[in-house]
Amino acid sequence: MQLQLGRRADYAIRAAVDLAGHYGDGQRRKARAISHEMSIPKSYVPQILAELVRAELAVSMAGRDGGYALAREPNLITLLDVVRSVKGETISASCVLRGGPCPRDELCAVHIPLAKAQEALLDSLETTSLADLVAIDLPVQADS
């Protein structure tokens, strides 16, 4: 079993990590540079960055010297903040066995184990900052 956040969340995390890596250098990042550095398709970058700006995680400036930057320090932005900026609510209300909501009075057999797994994932995302990821400094690989 694989828990995945989805392509939009993946690209949002990559873009946010790029911005975090350049935080405080006095330069705004261009969308094309983020696309190249983080292996994000060029067509996705403006959409993803716009969502980060709407969520007040990033700021943008138009013009020749414009571009994107984080709205606050990387240690104050969590992975959960970034994921929610593109996905909204991150807990699924859909029941694996029934295909719809799991009624409280009739929980399915997998409801509690999956709820615990989702909670653990959310806790991990909430306790990991962009600064934590920049400190690891792993290379980005293109999608397969």
Image (tube, rainbow, N blue to C red):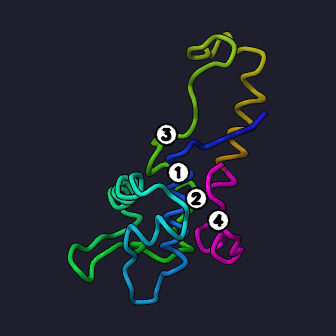
- Residue lying farthest to the left in this orientation: 63
What amino acid is found at the position of numbered circle 1 in the picture? Val
Q: Rounded to the nearest whole Å, what is the CA distance between mark 4 and mark 1?
A: 18 Å
In terms of secondary structure, where does tag 2 sit?
Answer: helix
What amino acid is found at the position of numbered circle 2 in the picture? Leu
Q: Counting other residues with Cα less than 10 Å from the Cα at mark 3, is it few (<14), some (14-19), or many (20 or more)?
A: few
Q: Counting other residues with Cα less than 10 Å from the Cα at mark 4, is it few (<14), some (14-19), or many (20 or more)?
A: few
Residue 106 is situated, as x and y percent measured from the top left of the image, at 68, 10
The circle drawn on residue 83 is 1
Q: Rounded to the nearest whole Å, what is the CA distance between mark 3 and mark 4?
A: 26 Å
Q: Which residue, given by chain and number where applicable, does mark 2 sit on?
A: 79
In terms of secondary structure, where does tag 1 sit?
Answer: helix
In terms of secondary structure, where does tag 3 sit?
Answer: loop
**Which label sits in the foreground, 4 or 1?**
4
Q: Residue at the location (56% across, 14% down)?
A: 100
State which tag comes first along the sequence, 4 or 2: 2
Q: Place residue 129 in its image quadrant.
A: bottom right
**Which label sits in the foreground, 3 or 4?**
4
**Which label sits in the foreground, 4 or 2?**
4
Q: Which residue, given by chain and number where applicable, does mark 3 sit on?
A: 89
Circles 4 and 1 in contact, beta carbons < 8 Å: no
Residue 132 is situated, as x and y percent measured from the top left of the image, at 66, 72
Q: Which residue, given by chain and number where applicable, does mark 4 sit on?
A: 140
Q: Place residue 7 in its image quadrant.
A: top right
Front position in the image: 33 or 85: 33
Front position in the image: 36 or 92: 36
Residue 20 is situated, as x and y percent measured from the top left of the image, at 52, 74
**Which quadrant of the figure contains the N terminus?**
top right
- Magenta residues? 123-144
State which tag comes first along the sequence, 4 or 1: 1
Q: Relative to residue 35, is residue 73 depicted above or below?
A: below
